[in-house]
Amino acid sequence: MLRRLLLATTAVAIIGALAVPAMAQTTLRLVSKDLLTTNPDDMKEIEAIEAALKAKGLDIDIQTVDLPGGTSAYVEALGVMLLSGDIPDIIYFQGGDQKMAEQGILEDLTPWIEKSENVKAALWPHNVDRLANYPYLLYVYPPRAPQPVMRKDWLDKLGLAPPTTVEEYEALFQAIHDADLDGDGTAGNTLGLTGFGNTNELDSIFNQAFGVTGTWMKNAEGQWVNARVTDAEKAKIAFYAGLAAKGLYDKEYVTNTFDVKEDKFYTGKAGVIFGSSPEVVDIYSGKMRQAHPGEDITLALLPIPSGPGGKGLAAVDVAKESRGWAVSSLSEHKEQAFAVLDFMTSKQGQDIDRMGFEGTQYTVDASGKVTFTEAISTWYARFFNAANWAPPTPLLSPTAQAALDTIKANFVADNSFVWPAEYAADVDAAEQVYRSWVARFITGEASLDQWDQFVSEYNAAGGARMAEYARTRLNG
């Protein structure tokens, strides 16, 4: 049905300059998990965007479509809406986009970005690579690269320098475990670190240290294999399992939700937590202070460790954006739709999206100095985090800024790629085998002596077929 809708549309207008001349009001429908008509702040931002665009000669009425806010519920509801033929002009995806791109309903953004007034200059390096591989989603944010933080006062009490090697990290986790840092008179009951769901957070800083350099690595025979089945991966998982066996890593990580993980950190049950972004690091700081009123608690960012394989953050998947904004190829107002996205990467758009509103999230004195209020702690960008935007006064804490600087200095592109649809079942099955065995290794239900059994199951579940295809891609 979607293909018929596509064929029924008129020919695409010739792309000219992105600045759209003054015209009658255009109505654009927009759908996003993070923009709801029931949220006053969301609607205040939409109104500010409309006013700013109108001042530029673009009279656009942005009509927000309400869908459930939870990720899985949103993805499901969005899929149902699109498959029914109800396709807004501007669509935020957090999964499910590839099927729509294959049906031809998502606009190729390449020519629009090339002619853009703002987007092109706002992209992060990984955005450029992802758009070259998959030109349908725009998500202008620094890559997600979880980094570890801990209470600075706890680090000071231990008398240890921030760890810089794998061995020093284990020593730090052991010291946290053995000390009575929370002052309750009981030592030996604090986890070195906690996590939730899977080991992705730990992998962010330990992959390179153990020599896991990318999704695909060459084995002893010079053949490309998935890093999941390499000796480097085995050594890394053995490290994680060793931490868990000593009570240093949370064996409940598989069943922890993110809020349970955070609670263990705030209540002193775990000493180290990973923040998925610089902004999240600041959220953790604020929540820690709320949990301990009257105490001046700050967080310390821990460095990337070096190890047998080297040093650096994990390679960033540049095959495609896993989430982001799309323009409908069926829209009758593509120029205006892209103009909205382009505006949101401009300085004015970023000022609205990142800073909120004068008198609420920030104040401006007679000299023009901007001061953020406490309300900024609950404000979040609904659209983008442009690489070329800088706030008029520091928006991030020194700790969070250091996390962002680390991300900027350590970008390495992965060699992963977008899988054809016929490999979807193999990818899912192999990943399920991997996650299941890793959990068993870490909790002690399985021994690393069973590594070969895991590899056999992984390959049988789809890993071998995936490797065969990968070799056709990577060998050129």
Image: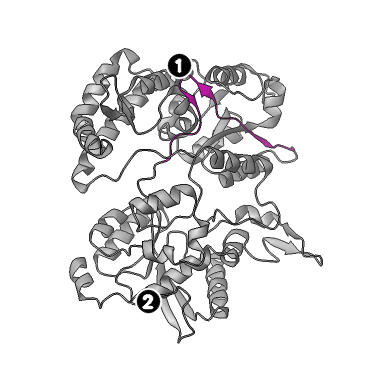
The secondary structure that dominates the magenta segment is loop
In the rendered view, tell whether residue 201 sits above or below residue 84: above
Name which residue lies at 39% across and 45% down: 318
Q: Which percent across, then down, holds residue 168? A: 58, 18
Query: Disc 2 on helix, strand or loop?
Result: loop
Provide the residue span drawn in magenta. 296-316
Closer mark to the observer between disc 2 and disc 1: 2
**Which element type, helix, strand or loop, lies under badge 1?**
helix
Q: Is residue 410 left or right of residue 424?
A: right
Q: Residue at x 29, y 19 (%)?
A: 220
Q: Relative to residue 124, is residue 258 depicted above or below? A: above
Compared across the picture, whether 255 is left or right of 22 comes to left
Q: Is residue 374 above or below residue 51?
A: above
In this view, the residue farthest toward the front is 476
Q: Residue furthest right?
A: 366
Residue that numbered label 2 is attached to: 333
Q: In this view of the protein, can residue 321 be seen by the observer? A: no
- Asked if labels 1 and 2 touch by Cβ distance under 8 angstroms, the answer is no
Disc 2 residue type? His
Quadrant including the C terminus: top left
Q: Is residue 169 magenta?
A: no
Q: Earlier in the sequence, mark 2 or mark 1?
A: 1
Pick the front one: 121 or 43: 121
At x 47%, y 48%, the residue is 125
Residue 50 visible here: yes
Q: Position of residue 42 (x, y in %)?
A: 53, 65
> What residue did someone put label 1 on?
242
Residue type of the residue flagged with mark 1? Gly
